[in-house]
Image: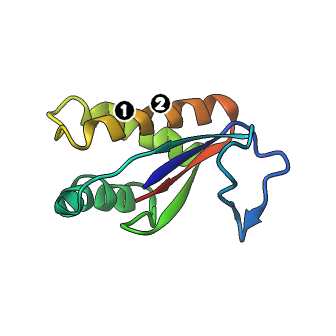
């Protein structure tokens, strides 16, 4: 499981209409690797994956990635800020915090993020 923050989209290869994941260590990206135990996948699906589909049509899922452009990142930031007003499971909280950080930076950079569960 990982996140990619694009610092720039200049020269980034595309897969269809979305930026493709590029090698870790490339100066154009920042990455965050994490794991969530298989026993928490249902929680992740209920608490994040399904709400993201309903919010912005995201196709992120277990073993599937999705690109969040600036518009989707803005929706994601708003959703996460509201989500943090409630208790967040300790397994998900650090992941949500990093997604929030990356989404905010992507908005600032005018780029986006890839989320892979």
Name the residue located 50 percent from the left edge and 63 percent from the top edge: 65
Q: Element type at marker 2?
A: helix
Q: In the displayed structure, would residue 49 be above or below residue 74?
A: below
Q: Quadrant of the C terminus?
A: bottom left
Q: Which residue is mark 1?
A: 97
Q: Are marks 1 and 2 in contact (CB under 8 Å)?
A: yes
Q: Is residue 86 left or right of residue 23?
A: left
Q: Element type at marker 1?
A: helix
Q: Is residue 66 left or right of residue 84?
A: right
Q: In the displayed structure, would residue 70 be above or below residue 42?
A: above
Question: Which numbered disc covers residue 84?
Answer: none
- Sort mark 1 into few (<14), some (14-19) or many (20+) by Cα contacts within 10 Å: some
Q: Is residue 107 left or right of residue 76?
A: right
Q: Is residue 36 left or right of residue 40?
A: right
User: Where is residue 94 drawn, in percent x and y?
Assistant: 31, 35
Q: Residue placed farthest to the right in the image?
A: 11
Name the residue located 51 percent from the left edge and 37 percent from the top edge: 103
- Sort mark 2 into few (<14), some (14-19) or many (20+) by Cα contacts within 10 Å: few
Q: In the displayed structure, would residue 41 be above or below residue 108?
A: below
Q: Which residue is mark 2?
A: 101
For the residues labelled 1 and 2, the Cα–Cα distance comes to 6 Å
Q: Quadrant of the N terminus?
A: bottom left
Instruction: Name the image quarter holding residue 82.
Output: top left
Question: Looking at the image, how many numbered discs can be counted on the residues?
Answer: 2
User: Where is residue 9 drawn, in percent x and y?
Assistant: 76, 46
- Towards the viewer: 12 or 1: 1
User: Where is residue 56 drawn, in percent x and y?
Assistant: 45, 56
User: Where is residue 115 drawn, in percent x and y?
Assistant: 48, 53
Q: In the displayed structure, would residue 105 be above or below residue 8?
A: above
Instruction: Name the image quarter holding residue 75.
Output: top left
């Amino acid at each position: 499981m990982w996140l990619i923050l694009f610092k720039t989209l200049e020269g980034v290869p595309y897969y269809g209409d979305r930026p493709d994941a590029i090698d870790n260590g490339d100066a154009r990206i920042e990455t965050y690797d994490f794991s969530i135990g298989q026993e928490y996948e249902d929680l992740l699906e209920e608490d994040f994956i399904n709400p993201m589909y309903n919010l912005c049509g995201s196709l992120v899922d277990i073993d599937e990635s999705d690109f969040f452009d600036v518009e989707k990142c803005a929706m994601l930031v708003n959703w996460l800020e509201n989500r943090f007003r409630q208790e967040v499971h300790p397994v998900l909280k650090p992941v949500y915090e990093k997604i929030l950080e990356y989404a905010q930076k992507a908005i600032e950079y005018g780029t986006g993020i890839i989320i892979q569960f």
